[in-house]
Amino acid sequence: MSETKAQIVELMTRIGRAARAAAPALAQAGTAQKNAALAAAAAAIRARSADILAANAEDMAAARARDLSHALLDRLALDPARIESMARGLDAIAALLDPVGAIAGQWRQPNGLLFQRVRVPLGVIGIIYESRPNVTADAGALCLKSGNPVILRGGSESTRSSHAIHACLTAGLEAAGLPLEAIQLVPTTDREAVGCMLGGMREYIDVLVPRGGKALVARVRAEARVPVIGHLEGVCHVYVDRDADAGMARSIVHNAKLRRTGVCGAAETLLVDRAAGPGLLAVLVRDLLDAGCEVRGDETVQAVDLRVRAADEADWSAEYLDAVIAARVVDGVDAAIAHIARYGSSHTEAIVTANTATAERFLTRVDSAIVLHNASTQFADGGEFGMGAEIGISTDRFHARGPVGVEQLTSYKYVVRGVGQTRA
């Protein structure tokens, strides 16, 4: 029997009140207590690995029955290695410096007043995500470490997996004596719950973080009545310059596209300098084709191999999240920068070149959240940045940009210390 709208509103209001009530205790929790909760949660994930895998197997069976794409199935799938990676992520977050209470800056005025900018939690965070059950662990842990109660609303396709993982987080909170309401998972898959989080919970939710497909993030941005941290899509580029090492270029392009095609840091467009010559272009294109990647190219790229399909205008701004890549030949680094500015999504871009001046021109002039020199775009990941994990890669310019980790989940307040000063 499906729930009525009134029942969903009552449920979400109850969850919101509980999160708000948990906020003071979590904000005041010491580093040792938060780390103890994370360690216990990591231990629970390892101990309950079989339960998590069984839940995921049910989710996968249901997803296959719905004929979900290969990319979505890859995002949803868990195996022992991915479960261990989740647990290690929690361990890594526990090892991070606690941002809460950290002094981000201080100065003394001539009148003797001491001004300090001190990091504080953002408040109650609502996270709406699709497919990836590991987000349950990553988001819950990051919010816990940064002192923010969190309301997690995962996708219907990952509901069993997410509940199994959430149970481990709850076990960690209980073991450390922290309120269980600090990390809540919305128990219903009814989409009305998302509507409540977007428009009906301003009293309880301070910030929303969407993590999923373009349609989800666009809806959140359009309907949310609280601030949003997120990105619309990851149209990521690799530009291979005339001064690139051929072996390095081949390795980076292959990894950037095919290591995992369903992640937001996967390369979607390959740009090759015309001056690099047809030989290097052919090596890059044929390597992708031979690996099973569909290549959609301009006329020059099509001339390299009969297997290349003709690209149309929509391909240059496409986020495939699959074994498909658009490829174009450009006239040097400035043309590559112009292409990225026109078609990119300000997510992650890489240049492959041995010319440091060209590299610096690219890194300085490309206006994206992450820019890399001689490295794969698949490093667009909080764990690879040393953050333990991330809630997502923000392409916003407001508040947080790039991987959103514990520090990005804090704001600040000003603490002013005096000895009796009064203002004239």
Image: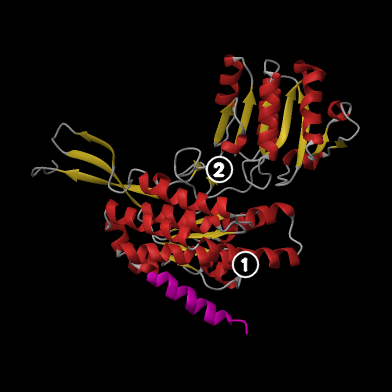
Counting every numbered tag in the picture gives 2
The verdict on residue 12 being magenta is yes
Of 172 and 227, which appears nearest the observer?
A: 172
In the picture shown, does residue 225 fall above or below 98? below
Discs 2/1, front: 1
**Numbered range of the magenta stretch:** 1-18
Where does residue 144 sit, x and y in percent of width and height?
38, 56
Direction from residue 335 to residue 87 in the image, left or right: left
Direction from residue 233 to residue 185 in the image, left or right: left
Res 148 → quadrant: bottom left
Direction from residue 227 to residue 329 in the image, left or right: right
The verdict on residue 129 being magenta is no
Tell me the number on the disc at residue 156. Answer: 1
User: Gap in Å between the C-alphas at discs 2 and 1?
Assistant: 26 Å
Of 168 and 375, which appears nearest the observer?
A: 168
Where does residue 270 sit, x and y in percent of width and height?
73, 31
In the picture shown, does residue 331 fall above or below 382? above
Q: Residues within 10 Å of mark 2 (few under 14, many from 20)?
A: many
Q: Quadrant of the N terminus?
A: bottom right
Would you say residue 229 is visible in this rendering?
no
For badge 1, the amino acid type reads Ser
* Residue ID at (61%, 35%): 377
* Residue ID at (72%, 35%): 269
* Residue ID at (8%, 42%): 419
Tags 2 and 1 touching, CB below 8 Å: no
Where does residue 69 sit, x and y in percent of width and height?
74, 56
Q: Residues within 10 Å of mark 1 (few under 14, many from 20)?
A: some
In the picture shown, does residue 97 fall above or below 328? below
Where does residue 14 sit, x and y in percent of width and height?
43, 75
Look at the magenta stretch and give its main secondary structure: helix
Q: In this figure, which residue is indicated by the disc labeled 2?
A: 395
